[in-house]
Image: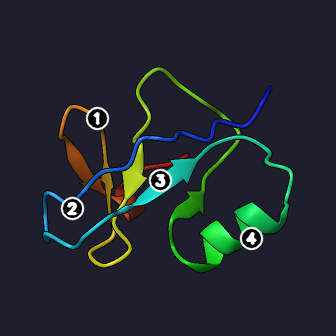
Amino acid sequence: GKPSRRRRRMKRCPECDTPRPATIMFGMPRMDAQLEDDLEKGRIVLAGCVISDDDPEWQCLECGVNIWPDGRTQPKDDYEY
């Protein structure tokens, strides 16, 4: 399937208040200059290829939690993509 590049940005991590957690991108993206820049600057993190109906949308690069649109959080090490 087509990679999921979600556009909406979260303003702050609900756990540690770090600004602008990274958007999680699922699927098999085509690497291009924009994606490389987004990865390098921590705007996007890559996840797995299996997409479910209940995947997190963001990941805090500071405290390491995954964040769902409904506000739930879970440590990234406790969640399998």
Q: Tag on residue 23?
A: 3
Q: Earlier in the sequence, mark 3 or mark 2?
A: 2
Q: CA distance from mark 1 to mark 4?
A: 25 Å
Q: Disc 1 residue type?
A: Pro
Depicted 49 relative to depicted 18: above or below: above
Q: Secondary structure at mark 4?
A: helix
Location of residue 23 in the rendering, given as x and y in whole percent from the top left corner: 47, 53
Q: Residue at point 62% right, 41% down?
A: 5
Q: Residue at image x 60%, y 30%?
A: 51
| Cα–Cα span, label 4 and label 2 | 23 Å
Q: CA distance from mark 3 to mark 4?
A: 14 Å
Type of residue at label 3?
A: Thr
The residue beneath circle 1 is: 69
Cα separation between marks 3 and 1: 11 Å
Quote the CA–CA distance across marks 3 and 2.
12 Å
Q: Quadrant of residue 16?
A: bottom left
**What secondary structure is found at the residue carrying circle 2?**
loop
80 to 36, vertically: above or below: above
Lower sequence index among marks 3 and 4: 3
Q: Which percent across, then down, holds residue 12?
A: 20, 61
Query: Who comes first in sequence, dot 1 or dot 4?
Result: 4
Q: Which mark is residue 13?
A: 2
Q: Amino acid at mark 4?
A: Glu
